[in-house]
């Protein structure tokens, strides 16, 4: 079982930055690939943002965030981060951290554990 708690969301102007954090409570954090997903207003399904492999050696990004967002992990602290730069109003969403016991996926339904989410609002 993995419990995930996100933090760092908030209100920011377009062009600004935020850093999301996700704290995991599990004995074997380094066995999981970690991902970030988001659910924009009015959307039912969560959309893929970024994922990093269990080793941190491979990261994949959605085209919409490439070059602006960076995912990283700190296994010693059981943390995963999402640095978000040059934010746009279309980045407004609830952001979720997720853990995948298999290799990192871009598909939300392949993730095993989820946090409660943190709201990010980008004003124009």
Image: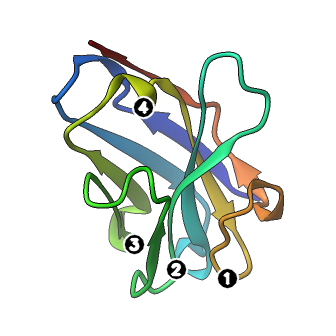
Tag 2 secondary structure = loop
In terms of image quadrants, where is residue 47?
top right
Compared with 97, 119 (above or below) is above
| Foreground: disc 3 or disc 2 | 2
Mark nearest the camera among 1 and 4 is 4
Q: Is residue 27 above or below residue 82?
A: below
The CA distance from mark 1 to mark 2 is 6 Å
Where residue 97 appears, x then y in whole percent?
56, 47
Q: Residue at x 67, y 71 (%)?
A: 105
Residue 59, label in figure: none
How busy is the neighbourhood of tag 4: few (under 14 within 10 Å), some, or many (20 plus)? many
According to the picture, the residue beneath numbered tag 3 turns out to be 75
Q: Can you say which quadrant of the picture contains the C terminus?
A: top left
Label count reads 4
Asked if disc 1 and disc 2 are in contact, CB closer than 8 Å, the reply is yes
Whether residues under marks 4 and 2 lie with C-beta atoms below 8 angstroms apart, the answer is no
Q: Sequence order check: which comes first, mark 3 or mark 2?
A: 2
Question: Which mark is first along the chain, 2 or 4?
Answer: 2
Marks 3/1: CA–CA distance? 16 Å
Residue that carries the numbered disc 1 in the rendered image: 103
Give the residue number, with chain letter if any, for mark 2.
Answer: 53
SS at circle 3: helix
**1 or 2: tag closer to the N-terminus:** 2
Pointer 4: what residue? 91
Q: Are marks 3 and 1 in contact (CB under 8 Å)?
A: no
Q: Crowding near pointer 3: few (<14 within 10 Å), some, many (20+)?
A: some
Identified at 16% across, 29% down, the residue is 16
Mark 4 and mark 3 in contact (Cβ < 8 Å)?
A: no
């Amino acid at each position: 079982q993995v419990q995930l708690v996100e933090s760092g969301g908030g209100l920011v102007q377009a062009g600004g930055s935020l850093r999301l954090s996700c704290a995991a409570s599990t004995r074997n954090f380094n066995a999981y690939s970690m991902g970030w997903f988001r659910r924009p207003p009015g959307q039912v399904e969560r959309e893929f943002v970024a994922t990093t492999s269990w080793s941190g050696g491979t990261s994949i990004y959605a085209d919409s965030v490439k070059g602006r967002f960076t995912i990283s992990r700190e296994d010693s602290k059981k943390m995963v981060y999402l640095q978000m730069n040059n934010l746009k109003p279309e980045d407004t969403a609830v952001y979720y951290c997720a853990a995948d016991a298999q290799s990192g996926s871009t598909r939300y339904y392949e993730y095993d554990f989820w946090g409660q989410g943190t709201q990010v609002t980008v004003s124009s």
